[in-house]
Amino acid sequence: DAGVTQSPTHLIKTRGQQVTLRCSPKSGHDTVSWYQQALGQGPQFIFQYYEEEERQRGNFPDRFSGHQFPNYSSELNVNALLLGDSALYLCASSWDRAQETQYFGPGTRLLVL
Amino acid sequence: AQSVTQLGSHVSVSEGALVLLRCNYSSSVPPYLFWYVQYPNQGLQLLLKYTSAATLVKGINGFEAEFKKSETSFHLTKPSAHMSDAAEYFCAVSDPTSGTYKYIFGTGTRLKVLA
């Protein structure tokens, strides 16, 4: 049973560019949440997707957007990258009927120069 | 609003000694609580969770935690530390009435195990 997978594993971008990160949830899961983990910090909730819609959003600007596909996979898009967007981006999946437990992927490490 | 405080950003213990990582939470509703472990350059792995059943929760790798409502605490313990326990540990809280169960994480505690 494959767990949560994310791609790419690492990414280097320059300020002002746009980036797309991808996540495939654990088999049987239908809900995807995204978190940003800055160096030395705990993860912070960006948003959650369920039934292809954004269900809740954390305190992140509109430069951060997402999408969920019919197969439950998800993308996180960040526009107009800032140096401060450098972080580990974690995807977590869960089953809507047992949402309390989220399973995390290995993350995508984004470096903005 | 919910929040989590992890006391001690770095904890060192000798191999075989007791591990105690502290977590205090703030929540206006009965919370769900979690401990995750993160090894270098990896994602988060669930150690254990409290979801309003037994207050003493046993997890993987010999870890356990006790929910104490009166102290608003959910400290993580392990009787005997092993070298492989060296990692970063995160406590998280979620609101089971929110509909999304988004996690609020603490800032983490880095555990070092000394030979």
Image: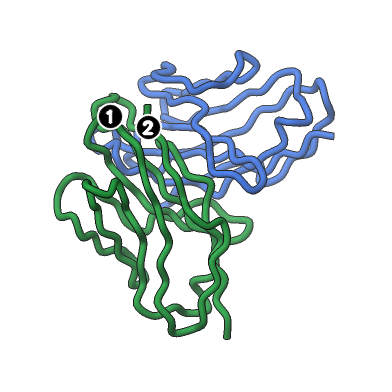
Chain colours: A blue, B green
The chain that hosts pointer 1 is B
Q: Is residue A52 above or below residue B72?
A: above
Residue B37 in the image: x percent, y percent? 47, 58
Left or right of residue B74: residue A109:
right
Foreground of the two, B80 or A70: B80
The kind of secondary structure element at disc 2 is loop
Whether label 2 touches label 1, CB < 8 Å: yes
Distance from Cα at disc 2 to Cα at disc 1:
7 Å
Query: Where is the N terminus of chain A found, in terms of image quarters?
Result: bottom left
**Residue type, label 2:** Gln
At a point 43% along the width and 54% down the height, the residue shown is B36
Residue B80 in the image: x percent, y percent? 39, 80
**Residue type, label 1:** Ser
Residue holding disc 1: B28
At a point 60% along the width and 38% down the height, the residue shown is A89
Residue holding disc 2: B2
Foreground of the two, A27 or B100: B100
Residue found farthest to the front:
B70
Query: Where is the C terminus of chain A found, in terms of image quarters?
Result: top right
Foreground of the two, A69 or A41: A41
Q: Is residue A102 above or below residue B65?
A: above
Asked where in the image residue B102 lies, by quadrant, the reply is: top left
The chain that hosts pointer 2 is B
At a point 67% along the width and 45% down the height, the residue shown is A39
Q: Is residue A1 visible?
A: no
Left or right of residue B14: residue A85:
right
The kind of secondary structure element at disc 1 is loop
